[in-house]
Image (tube, rainbow, N blue to C red):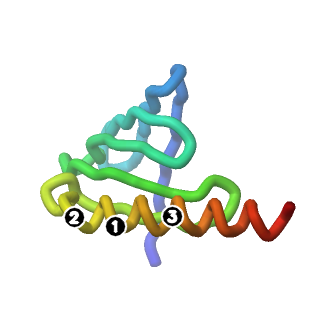
């Protein structure tokens, strides 16, 4: 595995990512973020904050799979909240 360098600068909901391959940016909050990588690839990320569980996809393939993933993540979050109460 090769070496890598990455530095992120947050400005509100915006994030600028500086790395060996160039500059990328993203916008969003905890649990949802969309952006453009330093290599020019568009992406969307969904996650359950604090769990390490998430899903990342390209924007072109984001149709039905993203909706199903969001529903699954929401169901999992609600189920885990119900268990802790």
Query: Dot 2: what SS?
Result: helix
| Residues under numbered marks 1 and 2 in contact, where contact means CB atoms less than 8 Å apart | yes
Closer to the camera, 24 or 76? 76
Q: Is residue 74 above or below residue 17?
A: below
**Mark 2 = which residue?**
64
At a point 44% along the width and 72% down the height, the residue shown is 2
29 on left or right of 36? right
Q: Residue furthest right?
A: 85
80 on left or right of 47? right
**Mark 1 = which residue?**
68
**Mark 3 = which residue?**
73
Q: Residue furthest top?
A: 11
Query: Dot 3: what SS?
Result: helix
**How far is mark 1 from mark 3, CA to CA?**
9 Å
Closer to the camera, 17 or 43? 43
At a point 62% along the width and 61% down the height, the residue shown is 77
At a point 84% along the width and 65% down the height, the residue shown is 84
Closer to the camera, 56 or 62? 62
Residue 8 x/y as whole percent: 52, 37
Residue 55 x/y as whole percent: 42, 65
Q: Quadrant of residue 82?
A: bottom right
Q: Is residue 66 above or below residue 16?
A: below
Circle 1 packing at 10 Å, graded few (<14), some (14-19), many (20+), is few
Q: Compare marks 1 and 3 and give the one earlier in the sequence.
A: 1
Circle 2 packing at 10 Å, graded few (<14), some (14-19), many (20+), is few
**How far is mark 1 from mark 2, CA to CA?**
6 Å
Circle 3 packing at 10 Å, graded few (<14), some (14-19), many (20+), is some
Residue 7 x/y as whole percent: 52, 41
73 on left or right of 58? right
């Amino acid at each position: 595995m090769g070496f890598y360098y990455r530095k992120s600068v947050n400005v509100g909901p915006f994030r600028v990512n500086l790395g060996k391959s160039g500059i990328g940016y993203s916008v969003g909050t905890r649990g949802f973020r969309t952006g453009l990588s330093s290599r020019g690839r568009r992406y969307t990320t969904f996650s359950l904050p604090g769990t390490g569980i998430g899903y990342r996809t390209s924007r072109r393939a984001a149709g039905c799979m993203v909706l199903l993933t969001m529903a699954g993540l929401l169901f999992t979050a609600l189920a885990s909240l119900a268990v802790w109460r």
